[in-house]
Every structure is written in structure tokens, then in C-alpha cells.
Amino acid sequence: MIAYATIGVSDLKRAYPFYQALADELEAKHFLGSLDDSFIAWVGPNHEPGIGITLPYNGEPQTVGNGMMIALAAKNPAQVDRLYDIAIAQGGSCEGKPGPRGDNFYAAYFRDLDGNKLNAFVQTA
């Protein structure tokens, strides 16, 4: 069971608005850190697993994990659509527009400003 996921970013102040906009839509709350720290983390409204952004601890440049992806649980397909729109409006890039994937999976795929891959999804059945 995943407790939280942390995503490396190259510039915390640049990445923050992207992730805060997604957190707002998901009703996630600030959990730890600040723009004055090297990380910021959010937790879901019912203490679901959280997500954090951080400058790499080792001081090396941020890199994108090939094959790594963080999935954000949405309430319904309309919220998947909104999360995708928010990500794109915040400067993210499309990796797969919202839509059904298989029989009971609705998802959208996008990358953040550093190229990290995320998706928003809901199981529809």
C-alpha cells in the first residue's frame, strides 16, 4: 500500500502553482513543508495517500524517471477532465487526453513542468 509519493522538481517555486492547482481540485490539504523548505507535501481530504514535490536531496539535478508515473484518484470522469485541463493550463503537457481506457477505466495523462508523468483516473464500474 502506498502512503505517499514524492516527485523531484528542479525549481520548487515554479512547480508549486502546478501542484497546488491539482491539490485544490482534489481537495487535498497542505501537510508538510513550504516554499522556504526544499519540499512541499499534500494529503487527501480523508488522509488518503499524499503527494509531495521536492528538490533532490543529493543536490544533483532533477531527472525524470523513465517509466515512473504518479496516479491521482479522481471522484468521477468530470473531475479527470478538470484535472487534465488544470495541468495543461498550468503549463503541463499532454500525454493522453481524457477518455475511456478499456471497459471501466477513465483516465488522462500529462506531464508537469519538469517532465514528470502523472495521470488522473477513475474506475467507472
Image (tube, rainbow, N blue to C red):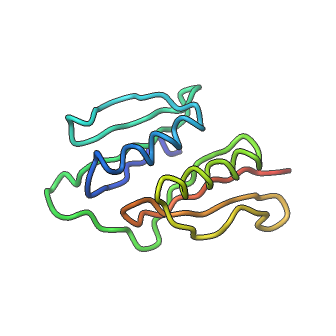
- In the image, is residue 73 above or below residue 47? below
In front of the other: 123 or 98: 98
Q: Where does the image place residue 40, in percent across and percent down from the top left?
A: 33, 38
Residue furthest bottom in the image: 66
Residue at left offset 56%, top offset 54%: 71
Relative placement, left or right, of 79 versus 65 is right
Q: Where does the image place residue 64, in percent across and percent down from the top left?
A: 36, 68
- In the image, is residue 58 above or below residue 30? below
Residue furthest left in the image: 59
Residue 119 position by quadrant: bottom right
Residue at left offset 31%, top offset 56%: 9
Q: Where does the image place residue 66, in percent across and percent down from the top left?
A: 41, 74
Residue at left offset 77%, top offset 58%: 105
Residue 62 position by quadrant: bottom left
Marker count (numbered): 0
Q: Where does the image place residue 73, in percent across and percent down from the top left?
A: 63, 45
Relative placement, left or right, of 110 versus 79 is left
In front of the other: 125 or 81: 81
Residue at left offset 38%, top offset 37%: 41
